[in-house]
Image: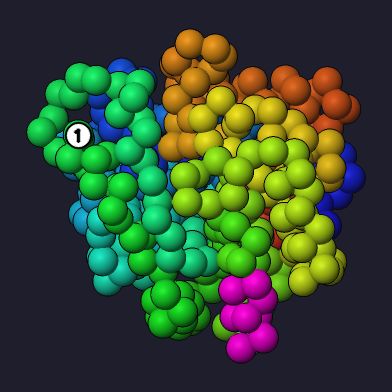
């Protein structure tokens, strides 16, 4: 399934689990901030918002459904944006916890990582020296010896748990091998087209950010999935906009947002998720491309519709 030639699905990842509250005063933390940031990103042109939750008091990543319940209904009531809930959550959380929000709220889309990896965040300590909360520094330091677990059994468990909910997956592939893992689950009948393949670049432990890396991921996905998939690209840090632009020129879709990058230019913090959406939207305008609406994204991805979620 190919996106119509002039349409690009913009996904905005609102808060994530990589960055900590001390790294940017603009990172949404409380349920109210997450909801408003998601709505602002949708207003700016995002068709999909990708959502994590944080503990309101200290910003620590959490998959507590009670926290999600404080922002999901508000987003749905105020916008027709497609909601995408993480099953990645945080590398330090067990799969049983990571799955809870998607299983309970049955969103149109949920993210799903396609392999275990050493998800290295420790290099952020070279840039950020002072932290407000006592969990932040050990969280980053520990990533040098942390395996983000996504075994074949874990992946199959998540797919089976959501099989009757009509939830489709943002299939996150951090390396070439993850594409082959996705193809394996297609062969097993646990993933059905159209597949949303989110190619992830620039995370320590995964593939790099060279243009050849982008092309290699695209060629491999083309060979494995043919016309049965929709391709999107996210890049970490300062490569977010250049690689999103490259993907758009190659007929792909894009993901931006403060989960993946805190920056809106050299040395300049992005003041909001909406700012990043507006930046990439301006680039798309210059390329004679248009952002897909939420309903166009639903059609492209064969989603079940906003009335069929459990929030």
Does residue 88 belong to the magenta stretch? no
Find residue 240 and report its horizontal and vertical position in percent.
60, 31
Find residue 33 and report its horizontal and vertical position in percent.
32, 30
Quadrant location, the N terminus: bottom right
Quadrant of the rendered image containing residue 34:
top left
Reply above or below: 206 against 133.
below
Left or right, 152 with reference to 45 = left
- Report the magenta residues as a range: 180-188
Reply above or below: 154 against 88.
below
Quadrant location, the C terminus: bottom left
Q: Residue at x 83, y 20 (%)?
A: 286
| Residue on which the image places disc 1 | 137
> Which is nearer the eye, 199 or 77?
199
Q: Residue at x 84, y 36 (%)?
A: 249
Is any atom of residue 300 visible in this view? Answer: no
Please rate how many residues cluster around mark 1, counting C-alpha atoms within 10 Å: few if below 14, some from 14 to 19, many from 20: some
């Amino acid at each position: 399934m190919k996106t119509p030639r002039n349409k690009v699905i913009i996904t905005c990842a609102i808060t994530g689990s990589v960055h900590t509250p001390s790294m940017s005063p603009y990172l949404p933390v409380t349920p109210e901030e997450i909801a408003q940031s998601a709505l602002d990103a949708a207003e700016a042109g995002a068709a999909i918002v990708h959502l994590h939750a944080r503990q309101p008091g200290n910003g620590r990543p959490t998959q507590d459904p009670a926290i999600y319940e404080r922002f999901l209904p508000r987003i749905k009531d105020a916008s027709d944006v497609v909601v995408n809930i993480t099953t990645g959550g945080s590398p330090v959380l067990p799969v049983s916890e990571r799955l809870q929000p998607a299983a309970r709220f049955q969103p149109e889309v949920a993210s799903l990582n396609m392999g275990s990896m050493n998800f290295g965040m420790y290099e952020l300590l070279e840039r950020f020296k002072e932290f407000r909360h006592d969990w932040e520094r050990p969280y980053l330091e520990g990533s040098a010896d942390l395996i983000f677990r996504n075994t074949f059994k874990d992946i199959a468990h998540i797919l089976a748990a959501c099989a009757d909910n009509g939830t489709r997956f943002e299939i996150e592939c951090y390396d070439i091998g993850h594409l082959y893992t996705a193809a394996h689950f297609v062969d097993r009948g646990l993933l059905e087209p159209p597949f949303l393949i989110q190619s992830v670049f620039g995370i320590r432990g995964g593939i790099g950010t060279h243009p050849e890396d982008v092309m290699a991921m695209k060629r491999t996905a083309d060979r494995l999935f043919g016309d049965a998939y929709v391709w999107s690209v996210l890049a970490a840090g300062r490569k977010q906009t250049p690689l999103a632009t490259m993907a758009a020129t190659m007929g792909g879709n894009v993901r931006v947002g403060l989960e993946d990058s805190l920056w809106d230019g050299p040395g300049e913090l992005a003041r909001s998720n909406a700012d990043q959406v507006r930046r990439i939207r301006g680039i798309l305008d210059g390329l004679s491309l248009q952002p897909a609406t939420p309903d166009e994204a639903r059609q492209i991805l064969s989603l079940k519709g906003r009335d069929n979620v459990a929030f």
